[in-house]
Image (cartoon, helix red, strand yellow):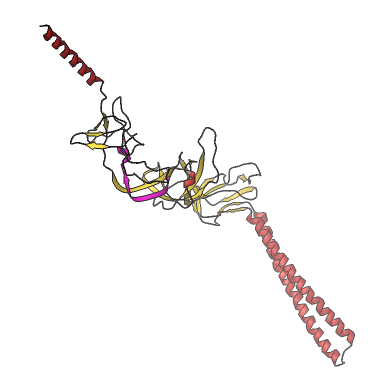
Amino acid sequence: MLNKKLLIGLLVLAGIGAAVAWWLQPRPLQVAVVVADRGEVRATVANTRAGTVDACRRAGLSPALGGQMAKLNVTEGDAVTRDQVLVELWNEDLKAEVLLAQRDAVAARRRADEVCVRAKVADREARRLTNLRERGLTSEEDADLASGDAEAKAAGCKASRESAKVSDAQVKVSVARLERTILRAPFDGVVAEINGELGEYVTPSPVGVATPPTIDLIDDACLYISAPIDEVDAPAVRKGQSAIVTMDAFADQDFPGMVRRVAPYVLDQEKQARTVEIEVEITDRGDSNLLPGYSADVEVLLNTSDNALRIDPGHHGRGTGDRSERCRFAGRAENHPRPGELGIHRGPQRPERRRDRGDVRRSRGRCRRRCGGARVTRDPPGRRLPQL
């Protein structure tokens, strides 16, 4: 009887111990199992903060002289061509000066013609007297006087011609003075903003004093993105590299671009990471109406492989539950290395994607993997785990 009770007690204790051991054993982690394939993989560098769309050429234009705005030939949003007149100040006095200079130049040329005709006549007379002197038909004194008069009138002709050139130059001076009251477009573009109305008095910006320009002109034919990248990524970015531009305003469209400038210095702004400014010019914007000022992101293409081993990054996830751990095929270094590499290596010390590691064992309904010594179980199909 005693042996029977002892046996029952031992069985009870063994059952309790087994239950406690089962309860305390580590629960298997749920992991997502994906199949690696081969395809195109790109190594890229992206901006750290949102970039801005800027025009390659943008000019704040103001007349060179102060004056009253007499003509305003454009409105905001108008497309203009190079040398088109945008604004003209009151300049009737300068136009009169130009007309006066032109008339004076014409008169100077006519006076020069008169003097030169007299010089030709005097030259012919001097030659006749010289011939007569050689034949003894006139005095030497008369011949010398005629020659001297001819030379003087020839010099007067040259002086008159030069005086006419001075009058022509004075015309150019008057035209240049008049031109300073006319504001022309320096390049093809679009009028973004106009500061001023007809009849208002406008002045150029004094030195050291910033005033709004009369016309803000934008060349919308060429746009680029100015964006900062981390100083660590800057050495890998070079002028001429291909890039991809994305914008919130065009969420479903990517724009091809090319790096046109990498700043030669690092920005060290307060409370911000050190960055390097780059400029990416959009090479093909299609039919999209891109506007300067849009926010944009850029990805500079460093390297491309058409047949690299890759895993969809959307499948890299955590296990669910309180004891979840990182356990993925393209994860960081594990204790069980396995041959094979994922993605593109930018160098022996900085791979773009890390090695594929882990000892994987599969069965029909479950998948076990050694991940830091933990037991794992395959996540149900169709369920997406949170990304790492």
The image quadrant that residue 379 belongs to is top left
Residue 363: where, in percent of width, then height?
Answer: 19, 36
Magenta range is: 296-323
**Total marks drawn?**
0
Extreme residue in the bottom direction: 135
Is 16 on the left or on the right of 321, as rendered?
left
* Residue drawn at x 23%, y 19% as measured from the top left: 21
Q: Is residue 165 above or below residue 245?
A: below
The image quadrant that residue 294 belongs to is top left
Q: In which quadrant is the N terminus drawn?
A: top left
Residue 121: where, in percent of width, then height?
Answer: 77, 81
**Residue 19 appearing in the image:** yes
- Does the magenta portion include 317? yes
Q: Nearer the viewer, residue 27 or 65?
A: 27
Q: In which quadrant is the C terminus drawn?
A: top left
Q: Nearer the viewer, residue 270 or 217?
A: 270
Q: Nearer the viewer, residue 293 or 277?
A: 277
* Residue drawn at x 70%, y 62% as measured from the top left: 170
Is 304 on the left or on the right of 130, as rendered?
left
Q: Is residue 167 above or below residue 352?
A: below
* Residue drawn at x 31%, y 48% as measured from the top left: 39
Q: Is residue 99 above or below residue 235?
A: below
Extreme residue in the left direction: 1
Extreme residue in the top direction: 2
Residue 180: where, in percent of width, then height?
Answer: 64, 54
**Residue 288 appearing in the image:** no
